[in-house]
Amino acid sequence: MAHGQTYLERRKHGFYWRRRVPARAKISCQTGFLCFPLKTHVPREAAELARRLTAISELCFTAESAVSPEVMQEILVGYARLEIETADRLRALTGPRTRAAAEAALALEAAARASLRDAFFLCDRSLALEPIRDTARRLGITLDESEDDFARLTDDMMRLLIEISEEKERRARGQFRQEQPYLELALRPAPGLRAPAPAAPPAPMSPPPALNTAETMAEAKDALDLASPSAPPPPKAEAESQILLHSSLGTKVTLDTRKMRQATASGPAPTLTEIFDLWFGDLERGTITSGAYVFEDEAAADKFRKNADTVIGTRKLIVEVFGERPITEIEPADWKGFNDMLRQLPNNHGKSRNERHLSCFEVIAAADRKQDTDLLRARRAIKVKRLTGDQAEDLLRRAKVARISPRTFQRHQKHLSAPLDYAVEKGLISHNPFKPFVLGEKMIGEMNSRRPEASRQIWGDEIKALFATDKWTSPKTAIDDPLYWVPLIARLSGMRSEEILQLKPENIRSDNGIWYFDIERGTGQSVKSENGQRTVPLHSQLIELGFLELVARQRRLKRLRIFDKIARSKSKKQTFTANFTKSFTYYRQSRKVYDARRDLHAMRTTFNTNCVANGVPDTARRYLMGHKDNDVGIVNYLPEGFALARLKSYIEMDQLDLSMITKRFAAEPAAPKGPRLVATNGIALSA
């Protein structure tokens, strides 16, 4: 295309008009392309000639069409007008109905529309055949269904059926695109207004094919079961509707009487952020609804609040994309736009303080500009250095801005879809309009498989390079340096980083000469689950490096924690790990031993892998790792756990080569005083 004109090409000898013959006209044409020299070098003249040839060719191709555009338009418009008028007349003749019945009718319409969309996705146009045939028969039009143009007509009819269904729902909710003439006529000063005569009812016509599939009926039944009052009552009424049934430490059960009666109040459609905030508020309170019963679990609320940062991040994106529009005004293109925005987000979105004041679209634009600049530099470097093959590909790969992972994409989708499901359950909306746009697990898996390998790897000989750096060899390393001890403890005990960093001196105990970590939930301490509370024997190599000396020092100085140099993060989780991992990452990068796939948690993964390789029983391995054990014999008949000596033997199976660690804190053994035995039976003893 030259100079913005379709079918116009500029060649060496001047301008040419070239167009592919449409499929509908190939029967009458002996060639697949039409090409004519325009015999001019003037762009304006060439563009004018090309426009004329395009118009003439369109007339010729249309004349060859079995179903002309005029006939298609007459069929589609006729069917749409009849469907809308019939639906309006039925609604006008329908008496008062309950909110549950109205919501159920909308749910049925939504289920039918979902079936139409699914058929459209599968290119199944059989649902459009009967409406086309009936309308053509009523208009006296004969169609040849073997022609290619009939396939185009069925495709347009499928789209029209979906659009008609959406228009029916809007009208059922009282939302109209056009105003009636009566108000305008009433406001005119001229008297004598006569009401227009009622139009004759439309001719009867067979409805579109029934969608009585099992899936559609199941979805409609669910919608009927979930139908409930849509307008939340005022605070006073809400308080009066809650009957307290039970209250104990951390748990409260109430009965919502609104679930036991049918309300008739109505109100405006809620906004997406209002729905999100209601859902978030219930989770923040630990609210679980089961029918008319409402449970409030403080433990569930605490767990949610610790991970609420990611949910709040999704809310920020929702506000920036959808604004404060009512849920009924959000179109399918908006839901798709949300997904498109997610796929373009950089993986470090929201982490930089310099970008927190920017919207998601501004962050994406900045990332795109940076990527364009870096790619330009990379291509120049490839050209200057004459790089080829893997070197060139690696340089281009590193120049691209990493976007969020498919799992993060899935998490944001979940945090948008869950509030909408909640609103359906509460009766605020009839269905979840975002559900068709949520990617399934299979698609997420395929997206993951196309990404570069990023799975966590175990620490092999790479750990020797790490322990050979100055943190483990310099005489300046302090005994309470967390960077020195935390990787060693994680590797030799399999403990989680948060469990290590929140250890107190009193958590290091001894029983029958066996030192162990007592991992518990206490003041300033938390565990991931009930299984996280356990005892893990202290590895002999940690004692050899002087860990007990560190514990004794912290006790002597009355320190609350062993690794008190690490402070909690400022995020809602307030974890020690968030700050420590930043320091650990920076240290490895600055010492040229950084590997993104071998992080601190990979130390724990390596411990687990070695336990399996060393033949540690699965029940004992899960206990040491703090994982849930489904073995009834262990859970019910060994509640006190494994013998400490047995666990110690399993821990000691895994030995590291620590020869490169020259900085050690263990006290040198004191020389014995007085005489000592140096030989027995004439054989010298080793010193």
Image: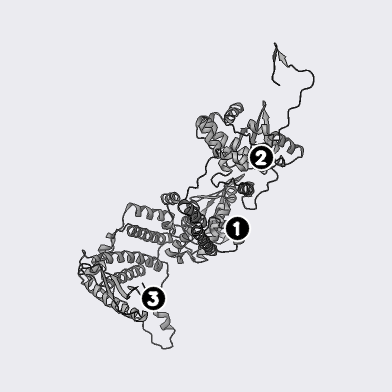
Nearer-the-camera pick, 410 or 658: 658
Could you say whether the residue bearing mark 3 is in a helix, strand or loop? loop
The image's mark for residue 3 is 3
Residue 48: percent from the left, percent from the top?
33, 80
Could you say whether the residue bearing mark 1 is in a helix, strand or loop? loop
Tell which residue pokes out farthest to the bottom in this image. Answer: 190
- For the C terminus, give its image quadrant: top right
Q: Is residue 75 left or right of residue 255?
A: left
Q: Is residue 239 left or right of residue 427?
A: right
Q: Which residue is mark 2?
A: 472
- Does any portion of residue 564 appear in the rendered image? yes
Q: Is residue 214 left or right of residue 558?
A: left
Nearer-the-camera pick, 69 or 273: 69
Q: Mark 1 is on which residue type? A: Ser
How packed mark 3 is, by other alpha carbons closer than 10 Å (few <14, some 14-19, many 20 or more), is: few
Q: Nearer the viewer, mark 1 or mark 2?
A: 2
Asked if 49 appears above or below 424 in the picture, the reply is below
Discs 3, 2 touching: Cβ within 8 Å? no
Q: How many marks?
A: 3
The image's mark for residue 31 is none
Q: Mark 2 is on which residue type? A: Trp
Tell which residue pokes out farthest to the top in this image. Answer: 681
Q: Mark 3 is on which residue type? A: His
The image's mark for residue 352 is 1
Nearer-the-camera pick, 404 or 573: 404
How packed mark 1 is, by other alpha carbons closer than 10 Å (few <14, some 14-19, many 20 or more), is: few
- Answer with mark 3 or mark 2, whichever residue precedes in sequence: 3
Could you say whether the residue bearing mark 2 is in a helix, strand or loop? helix
- Answer with mark 3 or mark 1, whichever residue precedes in sequence: 3
